[in-house]
Image (cartoon, coloured by chain):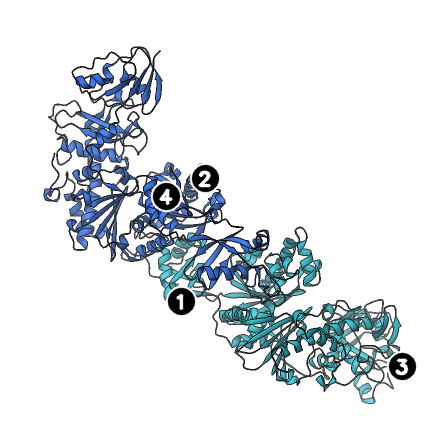
Chain colours: A cyan, B blue
Amino acid sequence: MPIVTFLPANKRVEIDSGEDLLQAAAKANIHVNASCGGEGTCGKCKVLVSGNRVDSDSAGRLSETEIAKGYVLACKTQVFKDLTIKIPVESELLAKRRTKIKTLTSSLDSWNEQLAAFKVDPPLTKRYFELVEPSLSDAVSDLTRINRALKREFRVSDVKIDLDIVKKLPDILRDGKWRITVLALVEKDHVRIMRVEPGNTVKKQYALGCDIGTTTCSAQIIDLESKRILAEVSEYNAQANYGDDVISRIVYAKKDKGLHLLQTKVAQTIERMIKSLLEQTQVEAKDIGFAVMAGNTIMTHLALGVSTEQIREAPYTPVFRVAPMVSGLDIGLKSLKDAPIFFYPSVASYLGGDITAGVAAVDMLDSEKLTLYIDIGTNGEIVLGNNEWLLGCSCSAGPAFEGAGVKDGIRSIDGAIERVVIEPDTFETVFATIGGHLPIGICGSGLIDLLAELFKSGAVDKRGKFHRDLDTARIREGEYGWEFVVSWAKMTGLEHDIVITEVDIDNLMRAKAAVFAGITTLVESVGVTLDDVQEILIAGSFGNYIKVAEAITIGLLPDLPVERYRFVGNGSLLGAAKAAVSKGVLDRAAEVTRSMNYLELSAEPGFMDKYVSALFLPHTDKRLFPSVHGG
Amino acid sequence: MPIVTFLPANKRVEIDSGEDLLQAAAKANIHVNASCGGEGTCGKCKVLVSGNRVDSDSAGRLSETEIAKGYVLACKTQVFKDLTIKIPVESELLAKRRTKIKTLTSSLDSWNEQLAAFKVDPPLTKRYFELVEPSLSDAVSDLTRINRALKREFRVSDVKIDLDIVKKLPDILRDGKWRITVLALVEKDHVRIMRVEPGNTVKKQYALGCDIGTTTCSAQIIDLESKRILAEVSEYNAQANYGDDVISRIVYAKKDKGLHLLQTKVAQTIERMIKSLLEQTQVEAKDIGFAVMAGNTIMTHLALGVSTEQIREAPYTPVFRVAPMVSGLDIGLKSLKDAPIFFYPSVASYLGGDITAGVAAVDMLDSEKLTLYIDIGTNGEIVLGNNEWLLGCSCSAGPAFEGAGVKDGIRSIDGAIERVVIEPDTFETVFATIGGHLPIGICGSGLIDLLAELFKSGAVDKRGKFHRDLDTARIREGEYGWEFVVSWAKMTGLEHDIVITEVDIDNLMRAKAAVFAGITTLVESVGVTLDDVQEILIAGSFGNYIKVAEAITIGLLPDLPVERYRFVGNGSLLGAAKAAVSKGVLDRAAEVTRSMNYLELSAEPGFMDKYVSALFLPHTDKRLFPSVHGG
């Protein structure tokens, strides 16, 4: 039986002789666009045959030049012998139509560029000392000997230390022949000795940066000597099994032992990430001096095992804004044992450490430009300001942008449709999936693309309703009302068509309306207009994928020149990494929480009106979106 | 069989009809002086018969008046019926010949007088707050709400708290209906929240003061509301089973698990004292907010479980001078759990926290008078100075003053001979014992008395040797060389005579010579004379009993007017109690350790000469002791 090898995925699959390449791709769980469902009419399933030429009935849909180069239509090409097939990189194809936006953190190199700007001045730092050996004329205590050196080095008047370390001092000093390395926590007016090691271990200085997301956690290990991120890893937050969003976590935490369980789960998630980072980098756990973590207020509470009950009940008070400093063991991170863990402080129950981390990381506090920082997830968190003031708010967008509450919505996992193009006349639909796999659903950024394309192609009107008289089988009345078929069942990894329904579109519109109303309410509350905003920073793991032009098309983001937009990427993680390198960043975050005012949108009289006005594509007031056409 | 009741001890004893009162007293373990051993010749065993008159052959040794009042000689009075007998308070008799010296801490009342001088401003303090209930317009976090109140109350910019307490906040605040009491640790630039309780518990504010002595530990519970010591308790340091003095403890600590064992033993001792104090006062353990402890450098190291190994080897460095702050649990004090424990800092390996506590307690730092602070135990620790400077030293006196290294020497326990009077012509010897019990040995203060009396009565010469030609059976050549019989065997609770030998006297003279040489070396090192010393403070548990005139007689203390002397009593415990009431005292102790210079006597060229010169009674240079006659 013939074997087909698909490039660039390099997947091999054995098929029955005479099956076509589209069937072969499906067997290999490889997505090949075939808008028509394999009827040979759309001409989208173009693939390139390497080596052996094959017979194919591709004429009519492909040009002579293409055929000469070896292109065939997958649905029209039967396989009788071994073949190697290249799939055109669809994402490239789809990307052609995307506006390029500057991204702060597109690769580890760009992360390291960000860090390179800083002087290394971490909250915990190692220093090597060659102490004078005691003598009768200088018989001060072991601790005094170390303290003298530390006071000189750090120019502080006070040095603190815990009993456990004191107990080990005499041996360490003498084993090291009075040459020691001290890991010190530098505070305002004193330093605290966190560890003492014999000899010079200054080169082994690592820190952990960690973003505790409601859905996904990410962590990086940072070499403080070279100021480089050595590795990054992400994991689903294991709490997610007990509730998709923060509200359901709060509800679960109220159950008997619920809080303890959720704390344990996120600790296990972080611990697994640390283990993976250590394996990848061959760094020893003991050489990670400390960790900086950022998460929203609920994630931070749960990570510390602190009750979130009051956050959900008026007047929505968290237990703390600034987390107490803890050690790894305090929160069940065995790898970090006695390493201190710093959490970014929050501003309010729904404006958390993930946002203060992001705001601190992007230097809004130093910028004279009026800047809008937007993190879109289940909640849209929005901060407006510059080096003189900061105002933040949070609006409940609902889970639609994270793929929940949408019939075929899924998270950003392999097989998720993340980019969509719809041809205006034929409604031919091509898409790219994460990992190039067969589609299994649509993720948040795919939904924004899809809604924008539906609107621009004229499939939906400005109320988000389908034009029901269009000549396409893709628009139909289904079990859940009117819907649009994004992918036919046989082109998927599923038993059914992947669709978007009018109900789904309703949910997406409510979500985008909430965010846009939040943005405009915030901006107007300080007496400026959208056009006064000079820079717009889009953050969030979701922000990595969002397309600005499409987000503008659906009225999620304001219709401002794309040059004003920048992607932050995971601002929370960026803040964690930056604070690990420079303690000034954490101090800055403390400033952020102190100086930032919080606007409670539900208490703002204009908010509901703005929300209702935004429940259209792109908006009831078309003057707000001059660049958008469609519907 | 007749029953004899002895007053004031109120001890009843049944005896054989016809036995004499001396035998009855012995059976009751009651000491009645009978210098002659019951021969009826010395006339010292005078007792008073209450109620029933008895026949007695007491004539000749008692006056008519005495006989008329009911006095009899115990050795000459046979008992045939029930009797009640009063023993003249011998201590009163003996005390007649003592100089009255002002004592700072003769009773709990005098302790409380000492404390009364202070404004209550303890290192940990409780404050009651009525917080504003959260509302939508004031929805700050629980912790921020508390911090706001604390920052206002204590005028600090920073408040710290541990995770464990944060976890309990939401319930405590709501249980207390936003009325709470905070136990706060007040530090230089911030306060730390140590406990939060619902409601107003300000009245329940107690602290523990503790002196960790090498031999004896003492503790007090202090009511910070009333500024009164509620109870005091002492216990032998259970470490003593593993070595009498600090050197033998250091040696034991070097053994496998030795350090751990010694730490555990002293923790058990302290824990027992706490339990006893709690029982006596009905205070609950949780209401003891903190403890202040003082001990010499070795005791402090061992209490914290820190190695003392290096203290014994040149250049004699301790591991720390300022102990890290610990909680009760850190050192195995379950009753104190999370209560912080402050230790007085030391100056050097042999000038410890017991001395800094004493010096801080007696306000040397505030006094313009040139003051000498002397704590005599196994080591004599001596501090000289005033409000401008402090200089300290430590001299190894050996254990003689603690009753060790002396044939019939014992610690200050029941039955220890603590006061002695010897008649110059007859060498009749009367004494008082601790508790009025039959004598079982001689304690330190008894030895000083005895040596002074031996010298003044002419029994020994100025080299400390017995005049061997005297007409008394008390001076004789025994198994251990020449000796003086203090108490005949049948007058004791023992099988043998209680004696002092020439070897014992040698040991005592070496001890007193070391202390006196230390004092004079210290004084001369700063270019002043003994006469320039305006105040002499005698501390130490031993200091409670020492008699200044007798100590001068043997050349232990300088021959200065007794008005310049004051007894501190247990300066270490006094320092602990004062610091518990006012954190300024601990700050002062930190100043003491910083400002005090340490004079290493062994490195002082004049010290050995001074020591040798002092190996006489009272001294080779009689001009130094103009008031002393004898030998």
Q: Is residue A324 left or right of residue B382?
A: right
Q: Chain of mark 2?
A: B
Label at residue B212: 4
Secondary structure type for disc 4: strand
The amino acid sitting under disc 1 is: Phe
In the rendered image, which residue does mark 2 sit on?
B278
The picture quadrant where one finds residue A593 is bottom right
In the rendered image, which residue does mark 3 sit on?
A471
Towards the viewer: B31 or B577:
B577
The amino acid sitting under disc 3 is: Asp
> Which quadrant, please, contains the N terminus of chain A?
bottom right
In the rendered image, which residue does mark 1 sit on?
A154
Q: Position of residue A372 (x, y in %)?
A: 61, 78
Tell if the residue under mark 3 belongs to the same chain as the one under mark 4. Answer: no
Q: Chain of mark 3?
A: A
Q: Is residue B315 left or right of residue A167?
A: left
Secondary structure type for disc 1: helix
Q: Chain of mark 4?
A: B
Q: CA distance from mark 3 to mark 4?
A: 95 Å
Residue B537 to residue A227: above or below: above
Q: CA distance from mark 2 to mark 3?
A: 90 Å
> Which quadrant, please, contains the C terminus of chain A?
bottom right
